[in-house]
Image: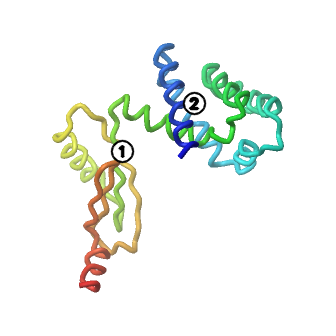
Amino acid sequence: MKLNKAAIRYAKALLTFAIERKELDTVNADVLALQEAVKGSQELALMMNSSVIQEGKKVDIYKALFADKISATTLNFMILIAKNSRSSFLPHILDAFQTQYKAHKNIVTVDITTASAMDEELKNELVAFLKKEAPETTIEINEEINKDLIGGFIFRTDTHQIDASVANRLKTLRRD
């Protein structure tokens, strides 16, 4: 719980600073790149979580790895995090930043799991339907394919979930 609150506070500070400097989209692109780097490199994740590696060394590593790949604002933020001995929070801060960025930009992420791939026409219809409910939002669709569903779909947003899959209906029938 404490980690989450700290990550949210740091993310909010970065978001506010990026807005003030009119670099919000640049910082967001940096955050996305950093998330991919952390997910793609177990060594980087281990280094961030290490209490053995001194904070000064982490600063040097961040500069060496990211100086020419991300903006100065984002790099300086990472250095600040390291100097405050909060490098282990960084992946959580990046996730919290993404959540706050999407809320600020009115972006709603919809996760839809289907048994087979959806065609573009169906995706466009889904976006149009969702836009009717909230015209000022931007809809972002993450599609996942799960053959175990047999048919139907599972629809998730931050606040709703609809499981209209054949597998769920069969499970309900068995239970009843």
> Percent from the top left, x then y, of residue 28?
51, 30
As drawn, is 105 to the left or to the right of 152?
A: right
Extreme residue toward the front, this view: 2
Which of 77/29 is in front? 77
Label 2 amino acid?
Asp
> Percent from the top left, x then y, of residue 33?
59, 36
Q: Residue at x 51, y 20 (%)?
A: 18
Circle number at residue 147? none
Quarter of the image that includes the C terminus = bottom left
> Percent from the top left, x then y, of residue 23?
50, 18
Q: Residue at x 56, y 30 (%)?
A: 10
Residue at image mark 2: 30
As drawn, is 106 to the left or to the right of 3?
A: left
Within 10 Å of the Cα at label 1, are there few (<14), some (14-19), or many (20+) other Cα atoms? Answer: some
Q: Residue at x 71, y 51 (%)?
A: 42
Q: Where 49 sits versus 172, above or below?
A: above
Which of 31/8 is in front? 8
Residue at image mark 1: 109
Q: Where 104 sits versus 45, above or below?
A: above
